[in-house]
Image (spheres, grey):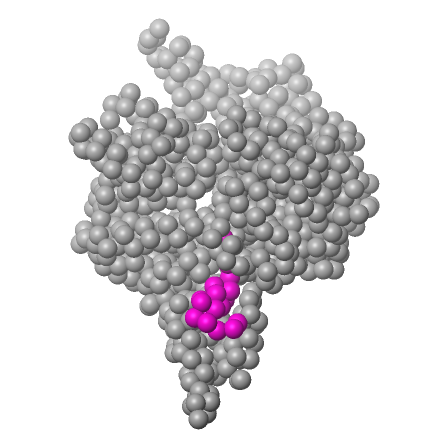
Amino acid sequence: MPAIEAKKLSFTYAGAEKPSMEDINFSVEKGEFVILTGPSGCGKTTLCRCLNALIPNFYSGELTGELIVDGINVDGRSTAELATHVGFVFQNPENQLFSLSVERDVAFGLENLGVPKEEAIERVRWAMEATGILDLRNKAPYELSGGQQQRAAIAGVLAMRPSVLVLDEPTSFLDPKSAEEIVEIIAKLNHELQLTTLLVEHRLDVVSRYANRVIVMDNGKIALDGPPREVYNDQARLIGIGLPKVTMLFHLLRIDGFGVTNPITVEEAAADLRRLLAQ
Amino acid sequence: MISIENVSFHYTGGPDVLKNVNLEIKDGEFVAIMGENGAGKTTLVKMFNGLLKPTEGAVLVDGVNTREKSVAQLSRDVGLIFQNPDHQLFAETVAEELAFSLRNFGFKEGTIQRRVTSLLTTLDLNRYEKSSPFVLSGGERKRVALAAVLAWDPKHVVMDEPTIGQDYLQKDHLRNFIVQITSQGKAVVIVTHDVEFVAECRPRVVLLSRGKIIADGPAAEILTNPQAVKQASLVMPQIASLMNDLKDLNPPPNIIDAYAAKGFFSGKLKAKVEARAPTQRR
Amino acid sequence: MSLRFVEGFKFTRMDSPIHRLDPRSKFILTLGFFVSSLMFTNIIVLLVIFLAQVPGIILAKSPGRWLRSLRGGLFLFVFIFVMNVIFGTPLVTSLAFAIRFLAIMSAFSFFFMTTSADDLGLALEQIHVPYSISFTFTTAVRLVPTMAVDAQTVVDAQRSRGLELDKGNFMKRIRNYIPILIPLIISAIRRSVELAEALESRAFGATEKRTAIVTLRMRVADYLVILATFVGVGLALYVYFKVPLPNLVIPIQIPRLF
């Protein structure tokens, strides 16, 4: 049973002339690490918000098609119901911290769910350890850096033990080093917990190495879907997403007639160049 | 020219945010101020138009000490574009938004109309002339905020984190736009931590860490220096990392963009092919 | 003036016996001061009530902040005094009214300075105030510094577009605040929407029976404080009903203006 399955999913915001997202069909297996990317306005944020029913509960409009997450048909469900199946991490760390201490913040979701105190405390400790913020438990959110705040947000979502984790551009407000650290943690959680991960990102150079799959959206539709090395091709370039620079470099070398591969990381690029120059 | 002379700054009762900063930005220069969050970058640029005055030292804009002019007067020459356009958009239409600053600065109505029309065209906002700025998308609102500051044609333009939330194409437009403004003789200063964007634009880079300037030079030099990059909580551009990994191949120093890298590797690979060819010809 | 006033109500984390008290006992103490102050118009008693707070302030290690908040309330202190005098109240009584204001303000300032919004929210929950209300309160408090930063940014951004807030006649100055208020309101609305989305995603409102991983517990010190409050209020009542109070009169006649 796939972790996420979408069939002919379409959504038009109330008052909009055309759909933001049209005829979306895809399925994601448990444990996959999927990057969702595309130019601004392509519909990736819209798609995410369907996964935990923020669309149509929070955003009104016309939603058609079928979406099944963790075996549950999302239709008619509330976001609160889906919170234990789909965890959602938002872009701005400031607006997803609710309490005046990190520990209470991570516990927030569990408290809302009525989880008994002892169990909640244990789950909170586990989530904080998994995201490396155990030593920050008594600090106030405003005392944390952006990167630490996002880790607290991830911990707060993790504590609810969802089977799918959706992150909407979580590194937007972070500096490059914090961005790398956060993505490493996300990848670790995906790997160790088999947590199906859907990450919306523009910074493909940072995240590509961890993903087994990239879905590129354009104008409300899925344009490309496959492993990164296959997806980062000429069509992707035309759509206008920010491919990793080494991938761009090798594209230029290919135009010059050299038989190069399609690397997505510095290590791959270096290895391929050494191979070519050694022959 | 913007001159920062031995400037230190702290909020009342707080620690030093800037310590003994010395910096000179000439007309027509393109400078990127980079550093970790909290390094003091935004504090520094707020001194360019007098929003903040140094607690020690002086900031001179075109020879005049910022302590001697009001923020409105200084803004006439230094246009500061803030990170979040929602912190400045308020008018009923986009056209009104662009006209706002022109009215504040006392331009005549005729001039205002002309400037607004021309700006709408330059920044591809014509179809939004009568729209409310609030119904536009994030990227479009950023363009309106940019236009609103360029409206009065300031001598120097400062942008705080202009690339956050922008996709690849939007950043490309921004890059071209900056090239356009600098060619008009304006100094452009951007505060950013987008290393790849800076690698493509290749401006002069000033690295700030904990209130002090730790490096100042061409992007290609600064962003290929691992210690400086690490101290400022940045990462090296991917191409620079690649060149670093392959330094045993003796690449020229300071390559940070894909085109220059391609030039080098193309050359090397062609040389290899040619080295083999003579034996084949026989 | 205004900002120093607010500073006196801002919580700062500190390790003092007062900070460690349960908010409920502290609030009962504050109410005690409040009620006692309202009972009297005699300047001597009011001064005693006012000064009785000082040991608590010292125990809370916050004398500096407290004095600064008093300075902030100075404007209203003088205003109350002058208004009363103008309308014919005897000088000493006018002074007494002003001191009463200060006593009440200081009592509440003492409470808020030593109680975190989180603990306050917890206290509200534990006395069975509906969660939505206590949460709204805690969130509002948490957002005050954030919105203050936003407000400063908006002012900076508009000043950078040539807006001069300190020029022009009265009407112009009011109009000049529109470019400040609108972005602030819109930012606040956007922020609320984002917060609401995040709340939903954390199952807010999923069950009526919310649990809490932290609970406030009343300790011996708390019960002692409550006891002391009852004793104090009892004493005040006794003085009010049974003790004839000396009346201080200053023989200066202020000509009646009204």
- Residue pictured at 46% horizontal, 72% vertical: A257
- Image-quadrant location for residue A116: top right
Judge from the rendering whether residue A9 lies leftward or rightward of residue B20; answer left or right: right
Q: Nearer the viewer, residue B135 or C246?
A: B135
Residue B258 in the image: x percent, y percent? 43, 67
Q: Is residue B256 above or below residue C35?
A: below
Residue C74 in the image: x percent, y percent? 42, 29
Q: Nearer the viewer, residue B12 or B137?
A: B137
Residue A237 in the image: x percent, y percent? 48, 56
Q: What residue range appears in magenta?
A: A241-260
Residue furthest top in the image: C258
Judge from the rendering whether residue A5 lies leftward or rightward of residue C256; answer left or right: right
Q: Is residue A97 above or below residue B9?
A: above
* Residue C144 visible in the picture: yes
Total numbered circles: 0
Residue furthest front in the image: B282
* Residue C70 visible in the picture: no
Q: Nearer the viewer, residue A91 or C106?
A: A91
Judge from the rendering whether residue B160 lies leftward or rightward of residue A71; answer left or right: left
Q: Is residue B253 above or below residue B76?
A: below
Q: Is residue A126 above or below residue B217?
A: above
- Residue pictured at 56% horizontal, 30% vertical: A13
- Residue pictured at 67% horizontal, 18% vertical: C238
| Residue C159 painted magenta | no
- Residue pictured at 45% horizontal, 67% vertical: A255
- Image-quadrant location for residue B4: bottom left
| Residue A245 painted magenta | yes
